[in-house]
Image (cartoon, rainbow, N blue to C red):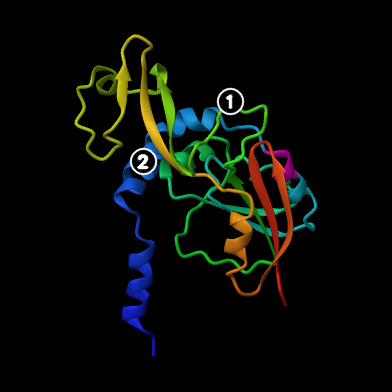
Amino acid sequence: MADPDGAAAVRSSLAPTDLEREHVHKVYDRIAPHFSHTRHHPWPLVTTFLAALPLGALVADIGCGNGKYLRVNPALCMVGGDRSIPLLRTGASFDQYVTFDGHLRPSCSQVLIVAWAFEQDARSKRRFEQQDVMVEWKLQQKYAKHEELTDEGDGEGEASHGRADCEKRWVVYERYCHVYCAGELEALVAQVPGIELASVEYSRSNWCLRLTRVA
């Protein structure tokens, strides 16, 4: 018999915190069109991974954003999912079929994880002093609403912490990010049964881990 209390406990532990709702979910929903405009170039390591997959392979891009990887390799069957509906809608503007299913658990044999690194390379302008950080996003005037630029909005249903810079005509939002130190992701992977770490690479201030399923 199923354990409803156990299932409820899992759902509760995965529920977003106030910090995540305000500084992750609401921010990405609000900045989606501007964010998508700045995120249209695929990462080389990801395109290499997709190019090496067999013809017709089923690929689930979890956290696909605007779906920029869904069209990298037309020989693959790509499915994208993201929590941010506004970001998915920007993907739809590329004539991609982007879907979301919060209960999707695809069977897979390979996994590629890409995460922002605490250790930024020499080309990066950022230097982190801690792993949990607030990173500013300057929402340009053409993407901002009138009430955001004039501070007339009440913020209900959207990120309420945006700061209007009337001189520069943009709105500043703070995105919460956790950046990963060397070895941190590998330690997390080691806790997952049935998964084997195939490779770890550092590229453009990101950690890239390739995992395989143990038969």
Vertical comparison of 168 with 99: above or below: above
Q: Quadrant of residue 192?
A: bottom right
Callout 1 secondary element: loop
Q: Which one is nearer the viewer's eye here, 147 or 114?
A: 114
Q: Which residue is mark 2?
A: 23
Q: Which one is nearer the viewer's eye here, 203 or 42?
A: 203
Q: Quadrant of the C terminus?
A: bottom right
| Mark identifier at residue 125 | 1
Residue 45 located within the stretch drawn in magenta: yes
- Residue at 25 percent of width and 22 percent of height: 147
Secondary structure, magenta segment, majority class: helix
Horizontal and vertical percent position of residue 64: 55, 46
Horizontal and vertical percent position of residue 39: 57, 32
Horizontal and vertical percent position of residue 61: 59, 52
Horizontal and vertical percent position of residue 56: 74, 58
Mark in front: 2 vs 1: 1
Q: Which residues are magenta?
A: 43-47
User: Which amino acid type corresponds to the residue marked 1 in the rendered image?
Assistant: Lys
